[in-house]
Image: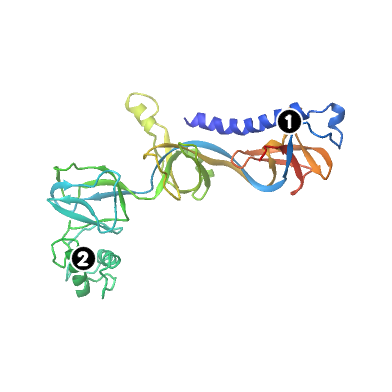
Amino acid sequence: MRKSARGRVVAGAVAVAGVAAVGWVLLQAPSDGDARSTREATPSVAVSTAAVVRSDVANRRVVNGTLGYAGTADVAAGRTGVMTWVPAIGAVVGRGKPIFEIDGVRVPLLYGERPAWRDLGLGVRDGVDVRQLERNLAVLGYGKGLTVDRHFSLSTYYALRRWQRAARLPVTGSVPLGQVAFAPGAVRMGRHEVVVGGRVAAGQVVVHGTGTRPAVLVRLNPAELPRIRAGDPVVVTLPDGGIRKAKISSVARVAIADDDAAASADSGGSGGTSSTVPATIMLRSGVRGFLDRALVQVAIISEQRGGVLAVPVSALLARTLGRYEVVVVDGGVRRRVAVRTGLFDETSGLAEVTGALTPGMLVEVPDDGA
């Protein structure tokens, strides 16, 4: 898939230039004497003009990606028991909502980077887990008189009792290990590790989840890493042909074995040495109408030049030996100017050129009737 996608990018750029150029050759190609003239006859097709600009242009290659959600969130049980309920796959569990149920008692999700590792109550040693608990109580609306710090105070005790009563938990003013679960943020249910009715052990992962921010996940060739970094702009083509502009938000620092290569190796093949580097592309909004893991195409910049002279690809007139010209329009005078081409940017429709041109000059392009 990657090879064919990459071929389409290059072929697309060349095809755009080629089609435009061939059309202009058939309609505009003059005799040798006319080619040296500084004045041109009125063209026989409808034309318009476009400005020569100074712009950034880029070559892009297309890789396959999958729609998904950024981040992972594996949630473990804090105590032993029988799993009696879990949310459905795809459900999003937010702060204070139950993430699963053990022995008929629902376990609320609270936000925090640290997992619970001890009972919390009056007299417990100060710690970051206390501050994590207090911050959640405050955000949930039970922070009256509460100071968010590392100390479990009487204010913490009373705030906790108020929340436990509202959450229909045993009202004790303390949090035994396993009564709540912590995750960095809201969890979108991805996969259940324990089925309802199964027995779960303390510390066992119950839910494999993700974050809730829509993203595209791609795998890159490790050889490309010197040219690709977080913040680089990309163009995502959705399954319905829609286009989203986005940026690479993160690139993993460690390569992983490619799934296809690993499968080949497991079956006795020779592909076990291939590896890829995961990268995440954040989307500003979700994609409606498509399931998770739907395939998309991502155009990633492979070469870029900034502040170069550029004209629309359709302005280029193909000549012999791979040379190009454009027709400059100055008032009622039309003249041909030889140019050399550089990068073709299929996203913007611009081609890098060098020649006797300056920004603001007008060049002829086919009139699309717009």
Q: Residue furthest top?
A: 268
Figure check: 358 above or below 150: above
Counting from the top left corner in percent of width and height, residue 86 is at 21, 47
- Residue 119 figure quarter: bottom left
Neighbour tally class for label 1: few under 14, some 14-19, many 20 plus, Cα within 10 Å: many
Q: How is the image coloured?
A: rainbow
Which amino acid type corresponds to the residue marked 2 in the rendered image? Trp
- Residue 180 figure quarter: bottom left
Residue that carries the numbered disc 1 in the rendered image: 24
Tell me which label, 1 or 2, sits earlier in the chain: 1
Q: Quadrant of the C terminus?
A: top right
- Asked if residue 269 can be seen in this view, the reply is yes
Which amino acid type corresponds to the residue marked 1 in the rendered image? Trp
Neighbour tally class for label 2: few under 14, some 14-19, many 20 plus, Cα within 10 Å: some
- Asked if residue 253 can be seen in this view, the reply is no
Residue that carries the numbered disc 2 in the rendered image: 163
Toward the viewer: 343 or 97? 97
